[in-house]
């Protein structure tokens, strides 16, 4: 199989006879059963390989490969061991002892479940590809036609018959056309907007793009016109769709971390180092409490070790680790991203992967598809031309509207309601020589048949009809249709009026040689007329006369021919696809043609006769059609330019069309040198690696046309290697590998295939480029808000670390225990941190360049600020603990009203030596709920008796963090310019957090779990007085920060 893949069979560049000879098969016999078995041994079954997914255990383990998670895991393990040892000593082995490790483990388990669920969802793109394969097909085997052979049983060399509507089961070489034309819809594979004409002619180049392989039908595409007999060439993983599966799988292996994940990992690594250092310092500072020795002659002897004290200070180190780790951070980030997805969904951007919300904010390059994203993917007539009253004068009409909705736009300055003869002939040909239809699916208009033909029918509706009574009747019926229950059927009244007056009796199908199609129509006068539409140059060659506005027919002389050719060239230069219109009245033996029983009918069965029938034509005019740009795209492109985001168009369409659209949406200006910014996929890949990087790194927009899946993937890969954050849009199967590889894969919701949607990170509900720009702005706003709550949580954690460090350094009893710190980090800090995600967006958010993906989450000045704030948090938390034990009052507030005993600071610092103190006694004290706390052992006053002091410390910590959340509203702006009510959610969140804190204070069961007691009103006054200064400290630091920035700007200027 590997040799087969290494040497693909270039069937497109070989003749049909050579292909048949390669497989030793005859077109009228097919393969024998023996041949099929031999070929299957070589090529296997015609199905896509199921890639082995990661086993569940590996996915679970992968969720724990994160530095913060590892720290939490170690902290939980140590907490569990210490809780077990403590329970064994005291005989208290209840659930309360294990609250801390159990909560940490619960967080980690939930995190792992979410991670595994997301991983499983991510790889559905490969499954969606399998749904594109057809189930059965008509195959010639052993001289017999098997009508429904399972498609998986196909082998290279099989002779397959395909008809209109059939899904192609494998990659095939067209051998025989059974109809005059054969068209395939392959936009999902190649990005071409129109169904592609297929034939049997050999391609001249071996190494050509998929679009140039006009004699090949590809697996997963659909036959939309005609029927044929094909030779199966590639099956299974060797098909183009199989190659795409391989590319999607390889791209999924290359998926890197999002910028936020990288920053958080980097932060986790630094935090690990800091925690390790501080924990070790705490242990070393307190070594004298668990390691004793006597000094004899300067040398330590009689070394004694207290395991109990060592364990106690080890517990303090663990508490410090718990305090330093922002346990609530993952939950708050997830909540903020989830809220961001809701906001984006309201703007038609459906986010499938949460981290994508943040990644959008640092997007530096948007690689956009053209068809359906920058354009409407709905063909529209933009202008049409007919001759005036003489052969050297033209009437040019411009048409507005970009969809198949007949009411969308109209003809500019249209005053020709009575319609001259030329306009009537133009409308008649567009309406009658046409097989398309239009229907409405909800708000969107779609076409049945060829998009160009649908555009012509919409033009006829905009032109109207010359009969005033019929015109009024059609207008009334359209008004009535608005009130009907069935909105799907779109009534094309004007087209129906023309088709009733000119009834089709025969059709001459389009073919590549004459580049036209025509119908014989029975006019209301009773005679037949041939109505023709096709390529302008082809129709002009076969036209001998032209029709003027007054209905007269004059000879097509050279000046008139040159005028029409000039007008065609002018339209083509605007990216318009030109179609000519002509008719013929002198039909000879077809002048009385009525049905298949007519003697001349046999000539209509032979396409070779069509050119002679469509000769000596009367030329009427021409129309310019294209897939127009969306109205909103111009502004979106300008917004990207202002925001410092590069836009690159990567399309499967041809170079001229792509360049014309890029000019119109102002991606290119008229003076741009297109040789430096416009390439086909093949041209770009032929350049050296250094040239490719130079082109992609240069400023300004780029366009890559005729791009294949591998080209798109390579462009994305190079951009990522250069450090860009790439957003890639796409709708087809061909886009899936690049969508998977990009930092942000964006699929189209309306026109996108399931494969593209499953491979993407985000889906556009309206397929609109401007929606991407809105999503980028939202992503930037969300990142700014995430920085706000990360700063808030980190500053709070610094405060907790300093409070524990001070506790250990001073040698006083623990003023905060691990379970309390866990509660503060997870529950109390959570609501304000989440509410900071609702901060209003900066008005200049899309006027700043994209942030670099390696920009620091917290810069040195912000870190210094929060070290100062954190120091105050630590001092206030420990300070109130010391005040309760040592001072009778503070700031006029009585602290000994409950009757507790005061001690000296030196006693508090050496509380471990309490048993050696003589005459040390303590009196019972009363709690605010009336309970009396008594002590059998006076030394218990520093352990079980510290509940009130510990409650004050915890309450100060919670209050300071609430006030600190107000500081986090803005990184630099004062609360005077950014008042709290600008974000009312934050005020609500602060109320919730205070409510939760009061819940654990005043519900006895919860108070016992957290080792705290209720506070009285005057104690709450003390808590608020000690906590409030944190606002003033940060306001002063913000003022200094603003001055620093102003001085830096002045120096730079």
Image (cartoon, grey):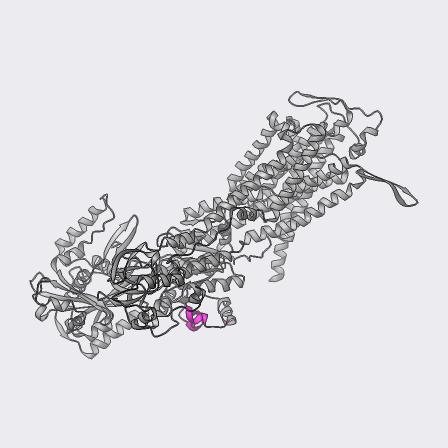
Q: In terms of depth relative to the viewer, which is nearer, 787 or 550?
A: 787
Q: Position of residue 1025 (x, y in %)?
A: 66, 34
Position of the N terminus, as image quadrant, is bottom left
Give the x, y percent position of residue 744.
47, 55
Report the front residue among 127 and 921. Answer: 127
406 or 980: nearer the viewer: 406
Query: Which residues are drawn in magenta?
Result: 666-688
Q: Is residue 954 left or right of residue 418?
A: right
Residue at image x 63%, y 61%?
1051
Tell whether 121 sits left or right of 613. Answer: right
Question: Looking at the rendering, which quadrant does residue 927 occupy?
Answer: top right
Residue 163 appears in the rendering: no
Q: Is residue 63 left or right of residue 890?
A: left
| Quarter containing the C terminus | bottom right
Residue 670 coordinates in the image, percent (x, y):
39, 70
Task: Note whether residue 338 is visible.
Answer: yes
Residue drawn at (47%, 72%) of the image = 687
Is 837 within the magenta?
no
């Amino acid at each position: 199989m590997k040799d087969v893949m290494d040497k693909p069979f270039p069937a497109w560049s070989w003749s049909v006879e050579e292909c048949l000879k390669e497989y030793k098969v005859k077109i009228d016999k097919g393969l024998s059963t023996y041949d099929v078995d031999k070929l299957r041994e070589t090529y296997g079954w015609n199905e896509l390989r199921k890639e082995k997914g990661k086993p569940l255990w590996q996915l679970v383990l992968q969720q724990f490969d994160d530095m913060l998670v590892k720290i939490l895991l170690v902290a939980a393990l140590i907490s569990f061991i210490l809780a077990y040892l403590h329970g064994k000593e005291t005989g208290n082995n209840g659930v309360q002892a294990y609250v801390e490790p159990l909560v940490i483990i619960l967080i980690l388990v939930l995190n792992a479940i979410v991670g595994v669920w997301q991983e499983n969802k991510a790889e559905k793109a490969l499954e969606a590809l399998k749904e594109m394969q057809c189930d059965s097909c008509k195959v010639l085997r052993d001289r017999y036609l098997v009508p429904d052979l399972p498609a998986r049983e196909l082998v290279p060399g099989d002779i397959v018959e395909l008809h209109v509507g059939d899904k192609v089961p494998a990659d095939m070489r067209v051998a025989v056309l059974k109809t005059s034309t054969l068209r395939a819809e392959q936009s999902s594979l190649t990005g071409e907007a129109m169904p592609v004409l297929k034939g049997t002619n050999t391609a001249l180049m071996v190494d050509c793009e998929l679009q140039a392989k006009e004699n090949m039908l590809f697996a997963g595409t659909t036959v939309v016109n005609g029927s044929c007999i094909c030779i199966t060439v590639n099956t299974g993983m060797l098909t183009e769709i199989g190659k795409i599966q391989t590319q999607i799988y390889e791209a999924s292996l290359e998926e890197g971390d999002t910028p936020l994940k990288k920053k958080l990992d980097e932060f986790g690594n630094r935090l690990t180092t800091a925690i390790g250092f501080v924990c070790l310092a705490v242990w070393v500072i307190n070594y004298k409490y668990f390691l004793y020795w006597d000094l004899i002659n300067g040398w330590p002897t009689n070394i004694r070790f207290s395991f109990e004290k060592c364990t106690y200070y080890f517990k303090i180190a663990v508490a410090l680790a718990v305090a330093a780790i922002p346990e609530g951070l993952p939950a708050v980030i997830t909540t903020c991203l989830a809220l961001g997805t809701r906001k984006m969904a309201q703007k038609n951007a459906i986010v499938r992967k949460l981290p994508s919300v943040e990644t959008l904010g640092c997007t530096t390059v948007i690689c956009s598809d053209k068809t359906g994203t920058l354009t409407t993917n709905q063909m529209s007539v933009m202008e049409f031309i007919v001759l005036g009253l003489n052969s050297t004068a033209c009437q040019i009409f411009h048409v507005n509207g970009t969809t198949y909705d007949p009411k969308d736009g109209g003809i500019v300055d249209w005053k020709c309601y009575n319609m001259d003869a030329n306009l009537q002939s133009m409308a008649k040909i567009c309406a009658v020589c046409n097989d398309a239809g239009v229907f409405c699916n909800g708000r969107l208009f779609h076409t049945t048949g060829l998009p160009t033909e649908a555009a012509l029918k919409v033009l006829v509706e905009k032109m109207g009809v010359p009969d005033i009574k019929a015109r009024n009747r059609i207008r009334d019926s359209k008004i009535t249709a608005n009130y009907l229950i069935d909105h799907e059927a779109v009534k094309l009244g004007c087209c129906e009026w023309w088709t009733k007056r000119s009834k089709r009796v025969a059709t001459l199908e389009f073919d590549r040689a004459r580049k036209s199609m025509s119908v014989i129509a029975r006019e209301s006068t009773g005679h037949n007329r041939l109505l023709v539409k096709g390529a302008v140059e082809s129709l002009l060659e076969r036209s001998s006369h032209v029709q003027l506005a007054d209905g007269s027919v004059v000879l097509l002389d050279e000046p008139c021919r040159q005028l029409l050719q000039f007008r065609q060239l002018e339209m083509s230069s605007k990216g318009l696809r030109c179609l000519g219109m002509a008719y013929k009245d002198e039909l000879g033996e077809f002048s009385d043609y009525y049905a298949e029983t007519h003697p001349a009918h046999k000539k209509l069965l032979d396409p070779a006769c069509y050119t002679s029938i469509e000769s000596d034509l009367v030329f009427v005019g021409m129309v310019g059609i294209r897939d127009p740009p969306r109205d909103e795209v111009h502004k979106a492109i300008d917004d990207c330019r202002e925001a410092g985001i590069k836009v690159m168009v990567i399309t499967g369409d041809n170079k001229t069309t792509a360049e014309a659209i890029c000019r119109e949406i102002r991606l290119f200006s008229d003076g741009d040198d297109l040789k430096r910014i416009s390439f086909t996929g093949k041209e770009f890949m032929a350049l050296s690696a250094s040239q490719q990087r130079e082109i992609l790194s240069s400023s300004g927009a780029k366009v890559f046309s005729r791009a294949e899946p591998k080209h798109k993937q390579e462009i994305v890969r190079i951009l990522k290697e250069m450090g860009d954050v790439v957003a890639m849009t796409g709708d087809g199967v061909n886009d899936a590998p690049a969508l998977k590889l990009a930092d942000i894969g964006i699929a189209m919701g309306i026109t996108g295939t399931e494969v593209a949607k499953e491979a993407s990170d985000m889906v556009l509900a309206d397929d609109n480029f401007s929606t991407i720009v809105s999503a980028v702005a939202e992503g930037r706003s969300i990142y700014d808000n995430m920085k706000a709550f990360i700063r808030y949580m980190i500053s709070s954690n610094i405060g907790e670390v300093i409070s524990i460090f001070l506790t250990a350094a001073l040698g006083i009893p623990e003023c905060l225990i691990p379970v309390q710190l866990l509660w503060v980090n997870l529950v109390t800090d959570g609501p304000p941190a989440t509410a900071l995600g609702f901060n209003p967006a900066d008005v200049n958010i899309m006027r700043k360049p994209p942030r670099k993906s390696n920009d620091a989450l917290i810069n040195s000045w912000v870190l210094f600020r929060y070290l100062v704030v954190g120091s105050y948090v630590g001092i206030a938390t420990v300070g109130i603990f010391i005040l309760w034990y040592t001072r009778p009052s503070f700031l006029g507030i009585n602290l000994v009203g409950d009757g507790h005993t005061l001690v000296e600071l030196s006693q508090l610092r050496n509380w471990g030596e309490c048993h050696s103190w003589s005459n040390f006694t303590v009196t019972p004290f009363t709690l605010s709920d009336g309970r009396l706390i008594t002590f059998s052992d006076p030394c218990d006053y520093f352990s079980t008796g510290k509940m009130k002091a510990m409650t004050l410390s915890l309450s100060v910590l919670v209050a300071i963090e609430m006030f600190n959340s107000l500081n986090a509203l803005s990184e630099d702006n004062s609360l005077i310019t950014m008042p709290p009510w600008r974000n009312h959610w934050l005020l609500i969140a602060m109320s919730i957090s205070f409510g939760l804190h009061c819940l654990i204070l005043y519900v006895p069961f919860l108070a016992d779990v957290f080792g705290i007691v209720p506070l009285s009103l005057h104690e709450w006054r003390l808590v608020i007085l000690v906590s409030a200064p944190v606002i003033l400290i940060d306001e002063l630091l913000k003022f200094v920060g603003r001055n620093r920035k102003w001085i830096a700007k002045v120096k730079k200027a």
